[in-house]
Amino acid sequence: MFLASNGFPVRYGHGIASGFGEQLGRTVVVADPDVWSWFANSFGGSPITVIDQYDLNPDHLDQLAQSIPGDVSIVGVGGGVAMDVAKWIHWRRSIPLVQIPTLPSVNACFTRMTALRDSGRVRYQGDAVPDVVLVDYQIFQDAPRELIRAGIGDVLSCHTALWDWRLGVLFGHTIGWDDPSAGASMRYVDGLRSSAMEIRDATDDGIKSLMEMHREIGWRCHELQHARFEEGSEHFFAYCFEEVTGRTILHGELVTLGVLIMSAVQGNSPHLPQEIVATVGTRHKPSQLNITWAEIEATIDRLAEFTIAGDYWYSVINENFDVDLAKESAHAALNF
């Protein structure tokens, strides 16, 4: 299933990122060291510098941006954090931006704002528009399959976020309802169901379908000036997990975990995300993710306080949240 997607300029193809650096002239690359170690020879050209140590604190990012020459192109290579850092530098310095995602675990290459980590809270700021996003099928298909299968998280999240948005509007605590965006959320989840086996097998069509959903969601976030239709209690669970444990796991898998748990807490057709996760083969069991039940339960213990203190959008977490019931729901939701 392909959506008639709006959003950033994007190119799809096999081998299209190989040698692309030679076309750009002077470049600064933002990439995780592990990613750059295997991609550098394919990139072409010689970046004047490779930024491989960074975090998402805004003060740190501003210092980083000011250290970059003005006559370069900035290239984000890898996953969501590299994409976000590259976006910030582009926005602060008004220099050309190219994004080369190497896995689809997050939609950061198609969103305009950077997901900052500021005083223990995730907040969004910035306005970055790349010259192009290069989706090289070969890069994705050479990656371990679990990295592709994790990419459903920021689309599957529409299932729980839409429910939370409706709840917030009902009780007068959030942004007004928008029927077209609500309908789009359901189409995105249906798109995952239709493409699940292709995504599982990392076919060209499966990768393109998934990335076009990410692209459309990123465009809609900008058009609405909010992400209520795709970010709710499942993302708040993910952010809280990071605070409680002091670490993270692959974003798409962490958000998928949140969808499975929070859809059960909501009483919101939890069988639907379970079906999609099972068909795609996305890792979701604690043993697969190298996390413990103690960490999940500690996150649930902290979740209401964390969400309210962080002033996150109204969700099922705000509505008489029963910690013991949520823990029972989590065990049931992940046991399939």
Image (tube, rainbow, N blue to C red):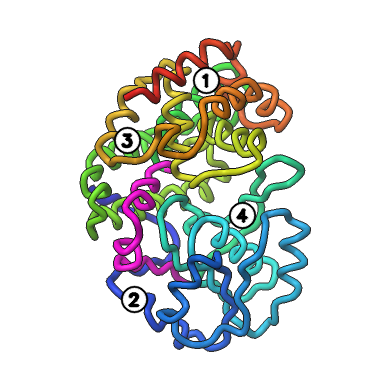
Can residue 179 be seen here? The reply is: no
- Give me the residue at 67% from left, 62% from top: 54
Q: Which residue is mark 2?
A: 16
How far is the residue under mark 3 from the one under mark 4? 27 Å
Q: CA distance from mark 1 to mark 4?
A: 27 Å
Residue 274: image location, x then y, percent: 32, 28
The tag on residue 167 is 1
Dot 2 falls on a residue whose secondary structure is loop
- Answer with mark 4 or mark 2, whichever residue precedes in sequence: 2
Classed neighbour count for the residue bearing mark 1: other residues with Cα under 10 Å, few (<14), some (14–19), many (≥20):
some
Q: Amino acid at mark 4?
A: Thr
User: Amino acid under label 3?
Assistant: Val
Q: Nearer the viewer, mark 1 or mark 3?
A: 3
- Label 3, on which residue? 277
Disc 4 packing (10 Å; few <14; some 14–19; many ≥20): many
State if disc 4 and disc 3 touch (CB < 8 Å).
Answer: no
251 vs 35: above or below: above
Instruction: Check disc 1 and give the amino acid type.
Output: Leu
Residue, disc 4: 114
* Mark-to-mark CA distance, 2 and 1: 44 Å
Q: Nearer the viewer, mark 3 or mark 2?
A: 3
Question: Which mark is first along the chain, 3 or 1?
Answer: 1
Residue 206 is situated, as x and y percent measured from the top left of the image, at 25, 53
Between disc 4 and disc 2, the foreground one is 2
Q: Which element is circle 1 on?
A: helix
